[in-house]
Image (spheres, helix red, strand yellow):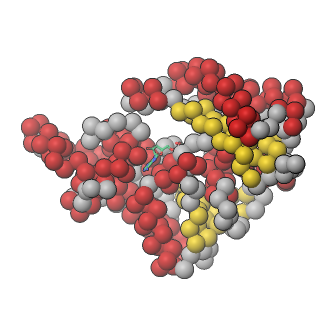
Amino acid sequence: MAQHPLILGIETSCDDTAAAVMAGDELLSSVVSSQAFHGEYGGVVPELASRDHQRLIVPVVQKALAEASVTHAELDGIGVTYGPGLAGALLVGLSFAKAMAVGLDVPLFGINHLEGHIYSAHLAPEKPPFPYLCLIVSGGHTELVRVDEGFSHVVLGRTRDDAAGEAFDKIARLLGLGYPGGPEIDRLATDGDPSFYTFPRASLDGYAFSFSGLKTSVLYYLNDHAEDERQELLASHTADLCAAVQQAIVDVLVDALARAIDETGIRDIAIVGGVSANRQLRSDAQALMQEKGATLYVPEPAFCTDNAAMIAVSAVHKFRLGLTSPLNLTAAPSLSL
Ligand code: KG4
Ligand code: ZN
C-alpha cells in the first residue's frame, strides 16, 4: 500500500511538459519532455510551446502514472503550476489539471512555479529545516528568500534586470554558443581560466542583483576587437571567456549568500532553479558553507531545471496543510512570490 497522499504534479509553464507522481515523501516517477526545437529560434517561442504542451500533456501524464504503477482512480490530489510563466503554456497544464480534479473529485493544488523550485530542495533525503535561506536562480528569476513553514516566504532581494540564467543564455549567444547557454558555459568553462579577463561584479544595496551590466560588458569587450581579431579570440579563448563570465556570476551569488548568512544567522541554505545545476556555483557555495559552518541543500541536477517532481512535492506539503485551490483558479503569468 502506497504512502498517503498520492499526488500527481503537472508543470507546463515554459518549454518543458512534465508530470510526476509522489506517494507522501516518496517520488514514484518524474517525466520531463523538453521542447528542444526552441534552440533553432535562440529562445522559447510562446505559441509553439503551448501547441507542443497540448500535444504532449496526455502522453506525459500517462507515462508518469504508468512508471509509478498508479491509476487515475487512486490519486488523492492534483498539483499544477498556475504561474508565473507563459500564459498559453500555463493554460494547457492548468486546464488539464482542473479537468482531472473535477473528473476524479479530488482537490486541486495551484502551485507557484517559484514555490515549486523552492520545494525541490525537499526532494532529497536530507531536507532543509524551516526557516532556511533559499537562492532561486533560474532563467526567469534570481531571488534570495527566507522560507518559513506553511508556505510563507520573505523575499530578501531579487534581480533588478536580467535573471542569472538569462545572463548565462544571453552571454552564451554573444559568444556564439547554443541555447540554453548555461549548460554550454558550464561545460566549456571546465577547460578555461577564469582570470583570463575580469568582468565587473555589480554590487547593489541589500540583496538586489543586476546582471545586465555584465552582458553589456561582454558585448563591449567583444566589440573592442576588430572582426578578424574577434574570430581569433573566440577560436582560441572561448573556454577562458566562459570561465571568466561564469566566475563573475557565481561570485555575485555567493557573496550575497555570505552576507545573508552573517546578517540573518540562518545556517541552512538551499540553492534551486536551473542555474543551481552549475558546477562552479555548487562548489563555491559548498566552500562558503564550510567557512560559515552552514549546510547546503541543492537538488540533484534533474530537479534543478524545470520538472514536475517539484510541483508534486509542493502539492504534498499543501495537502498536509489543507491549502487547496478553488476550481476557478486562473493562470497568473506574472505571479511573484
Ligand atoms: O529553472 P529553469 O529550468 O527554468 C526557469 O524557470 O527559468 O532554468 C533554466 C535556466 C536557463 O537559463 C539555463 O541556461 C540555466 O537555467 N542553466 C544553467 C545550467 N543548467 C541550466 N546555468 C548555468 N549552469 C548550468 N549548468
Ligand atoms: Zn523554473
Q: Position of residue 209 (x, y in %)?
A: 45, 56
Relative side of 252 to 111, left or right: left
User: Farthest right residue?
Assistant: 105
Q: Quadrant of residue 42?
A: top left
Relative side of 246 to 95, left or right: left
**Residue appearing at x 80%, y 52% in the figure:** 24
**Vertical placement of residue 5 versus 256, above or below:** above
**Residue appearing at x 80%, y 37% in the figure:** 70
Q: Quadrant of residue 153?
A: bottom right
**Vertical placement of residue 130 versus 86, above or below:** below
Query: Camera-side residue: 233 or 252?
Result: 233
Q: Position of residue 261 (x, y in %)?
A: 55, 73
**Vertical placement of residue 292 versus 16, above or below:** below
Query: Camera-side residue: 209 or 110?
Result: 110
Q: Is residue 64 visible?
A: yes
Q: Is residue 79 visible?
A: no
**Residue appearing at x 82%, y 44% in the figure:** 6
**Residue appearing at x 55%, y 48% in the figure:** 302
Q: Position of residue 119 (x, y in %)?
A: 67, 54
Q: How many marks?
A: 0
Relative side of 297 to 151, left or right: left
Q: Position of residue 320 (x, y in %)?
A: 85, 53
